[in-house]
Amino acid sequence: MTDSSESRNHKATPSAWAFFGWAIAWFVVLTVIWLQLAAWAAYPATWVARAALAVGAPQWAQKVSHQPGVLTVDTPFAAVSAAGPSGRPVVKPISVDMETAALTYGMPLLLALFITAGRSGWQLRVLPAMGVLWVAQGLCMALAVLGRITKVVGNAQTLGVEPWQVDALNVMYFQSMVLMPTLAPVMIWLWLDWPFMARLWGRADPGDEAGESLGN
Amino acid sequence: MARFFVTFVALMVAMFAIELQPAVQRSLVIPWTELLASVSSGLVTSFDADVAARGKVLWNPATGFGVSIEAGCNGVEACIILVAGMLAFPASWRHRLLGIAIGLVAVQGLNVVRVISLFYIGQWNLVAFKVAHEYLWQGLIMLDVLVVWMLWARAAGRDAKRGTRAGVGAAA
């Protein structure tokens, strides 16, 4: 005799392969659309980055300016280049540019996951999800800027920090540029749409904390 | 759920810390990256003779265009995320090891497709190459990791239920 709740749950179990196919399709379509708006869509994340730099690293980020698509940070450091037309070495202040799209392209991925999962009320959950993602993107942008400054200056003593701090910033620069843009949207979506995953796994009660221990 | 996320993040941070060690880079990551370039080159030369690979660079001697497989493009980070997800999720060790073995093949398989597709897209159009390289493929690889993990976690649940029923049957 089959358990009726289990059979109801089995009928409702979404297909992982269908999810994969539709998620890819939505991601590609939304990315193409996003590319047309990328420079302006990055504004919320850029505001967070500017605030983070102003609060966390004012000694490095002397002046932060933003044009659509590019965040520019003027630093107090200078680079001495080879002799100019006058024959004397040229001292040039160091500025770092950050292409904002490089940190904010995860938004289409977040939207694609919510749309594909299509759980009831997803339109309400996607708004706070976007807010959380903008904050994450902004913080990553600030870290990436600091990492780029350490790469350009290249000297811990000049930067006024310890060598291990330079190494840490280099690591965070890499993670911010390569990993976080796509990992953050997936984690935010998973957190907010965990019941969808539970349905996919065929669990009777997605909210059952004890039921999380599958086999343990 | 919260326990899963905390464990996942902790494992991921630990594995990245290990991966970034110079000894690990020298002995594992760089050789893997060169192998990836060789595999990609081997596959492409089966239908296109104008491809060569040296180290981690794949290039077309006729056009001069080439791609260099750098950190972030060798699939190592994606594999670390997948392994962390499997270790953090409740499952038997047998199931975890099996999932990791199959999952790494799935992720690296798609990564080879990424390298080869970018090689040809770059020869066709540099703007398309930038879009595909910096935005599309990054997302597609992460989707691959997500779906591999989803399928594995579903199988882990079924495996556990079979084990539970067998235990109940034996007890009865």
Image (tube, rainbow, N blue to C red):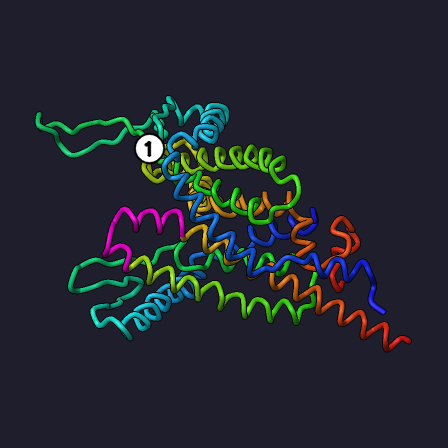
Q: Quadrant of residue A125?
A: top right
Whether residue B134 is in magenta: the answer is yes
- Residue A93 image position (x, y, % from top left): 27, 26
Q: Residue at x 66, y 72 (%)?
A: B94
Q: Is residue B77 left or right of residue A187?
A: left
The residue carrying mark 1 is A97
Residue, far right: B172
Q: Quadrant of residue A167?
A: top left
Q: Residue at x 43, y 32 (%)?
A: A42
Q: Is residue A112 left or right of residue B31?
A: right
Q: Residue at x 35, y 51 (%)?
A: B133
State the quadrant of the C terminus of chain A. bottom right
Chain ID of residue with mark 1? A
Q: Please say if B80 is above or below B2.
A: below
Q: Closer to the camera, B68 or B158? A: B158
Q: Closer to the camera, A77 or B102? A: B102
Residue, far top: A63
Mark 1 Cα shell of 10 Å, populated few (<14), some (14-19), many (≥20)? some
- Residue A194 image position (x, y, % from top left): 66, 48
State the quadrant of the N terminus of chain A. bottom right
Secondary structure of the residue carrying tag 1 is strand
- Residue B81 image position (x, y, % from top left): 54, 55
Q: Amino acid at mark 1?
A: Asp
Q: Please say if A67 is above or below B107.
A: above
- Res. A13 visible in picture: yes
The magenta segment is B120-136
Q: Please say if A215 is above or below A133.
A: below
Residue, far bottom: B170
- Res. B17 visible in picture: no
